[in-house]
Every structure is written in structure tokens, then in C-alpha cells.
Amino acid sequence: MNLNEIVGDGKNMIETTLLMIKPDAVQRGLIGRIITRVEEKGFKIIGIKMQQLTESKVEQLYDIHLEKPFFPILKDFILAAPIVALAIQGPSAVKVIRTLAGATNSPEAQPGTIRGDFGLNLTKNIVHSSDKVERAKYELSILFNENDFFDYELINEIWIKG
Ligand code: CMP
């Protein structure tokens, strides 16, 4: 599937976003519980890929943070173990997945959010999610190939579309 077809155009409310399960969550055995939250909300997972990132991929994924003082710490952390990349599709997916993830700084994240329930750290904050449709398109293109995306119907789709 072509990324242009799946990310959404800002008018159609069906968007596709990236949720990346970080090494801390993978090593803590939280993959299933995080995916369950995405599925229970009603979203469709159209791509799922465990992968060990390379330095180059981390630098591409976090290009906007390359010059930040915390970047070396962030890079070492992301390289510490595999991540699981999820391509998630549904109504207002970018915004809603960020709401499910909770505040970036885990100690400030509300209970009920992924970071609020599982995280206690700013760097080791369990997940990453894209903050805009265009950014989702860019980040998905780093972690997925076009043939990693799958088009299928969820049987509950008529109940979750606007
Ligand atoms: P994420 O949503 O993956 O986007 C960038 C990441 O950088 C962020 O989550 C945090 O894990 C990390 N981060 C942001 N600010 C800081 C900071 N001041 N010190 C350390 N890590 C940070």
C-alpha cells in the first residue's frame, strides 16, 4: 500500500499514525497490553513490525532532536533492545493515539494513559507517537516498507467510523 493513500489528507478524518513501543516496554513484557489498548479503542493495526533499529534509523526518526543535549541518551536507549512499530489507522488517529499515550514526561502522564500507567521516566517513556499527519507519513516511511501495510476490514468498522 502506498503511504500517500493511507496517511490521510487532513480532510478525511481517517488517518494513519505511528505508535512505537520502545525498548523499555518490550523488555518489560508490555507489548501485548499496549496493543490491546489500541485494539480496544477501535483502531485498526495495518502494520506491525519488531525491529532492532540502527543508529542511522534513530537519527532519521528523531531528526528534529539531533542537536538536543539529550539526543545521545535517547539514541542509546532506543538502540538498547528491539522496538515494535505499529501503523495504526482510524478516525483522528494522530490525535487520539497521542491522547492514549499520555504526556511525554511519564511522571506527569495521567493514570489511564499508557505512559501514566506504565512509565516513570522522561527518556524511558514506553512509547512514541507521531504528532502530525505529515510527520506520521515521514516516520512510517522510516520504519516500514510499502508491502508491510495491509488493507483489510475490521468487522466492527461500521460502529467506529464517524
Ligand atoms: P518521544 O515521544 O519519543 O519523542 C522524543 C523523545 O525524547 C521523547 O519521547 C522523550 O523520551 C525524549 N526526551 C524529550 N525531552 C527530553 C529531555 N529533556 N531529556 C531526555 N529525554 C528527552
Image (cartoon, rainbow, N blue to C red):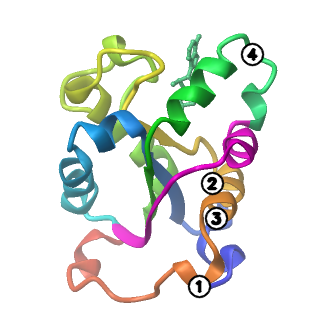
The image shows residue 117, relative to residue 61, as above or below, that is above
**Who comes first in sequence, dot 1 or dot 2?**
2
Residue drawn at the location 67% of the way across and 74% of the way down: 3
Which residue bears the numbered disc 4? 68
Residue drawn at the location 53% of the way across and 36% of the way down: 78
Hey, what amino acid is under mark 2? Ala
Q: Is residue 26 magenta?
A: no
Structural distance between the alpha carbons of marks 4 and 2: 21 Å
Which residue bears the numbered disc 2? 136
Taking the image as shown, residue 65 lies to the left or right of residue 99, namely right
Taking the image as shown, residue 8 lies to the left or right of residue 66, namely left
Structural distance between the alpha carbons of marks 4 and 1: 34 Å
The image shows residue 142, relative to residue 125, as above or below, that is below
Residue drawn at the location 37% of the way across and 15% of the way down: 121
Hey, what amino acid is under mark 1? Asn
Percent across and percent down for residue 11 are 64, 64
Which is more foreground, mark 3 or mark 1? 1
**Who comes first in sequence, dot 3 or dot 2?**
3
Which residue bears the numbered disc 3? 11
Structural distance between the alpha carbons of marks 3 and 4: 33 Å
Residue range of the region highlighted in magenta in the rendering: 44-62
Crowd tier of the residue under label 1, counting other residues whose Cα lies within 10 Å: few below 14, some 14–19, many 20 or above: few
Percent across and percent down for residue 89 are 45, 67
Quarter of the image for residue 45 reads bottom left
Q: Is residue 48 magenta?
A: yes
Any atom of ligand 1 within 8 Å of the CB at mark 4?
A: yes
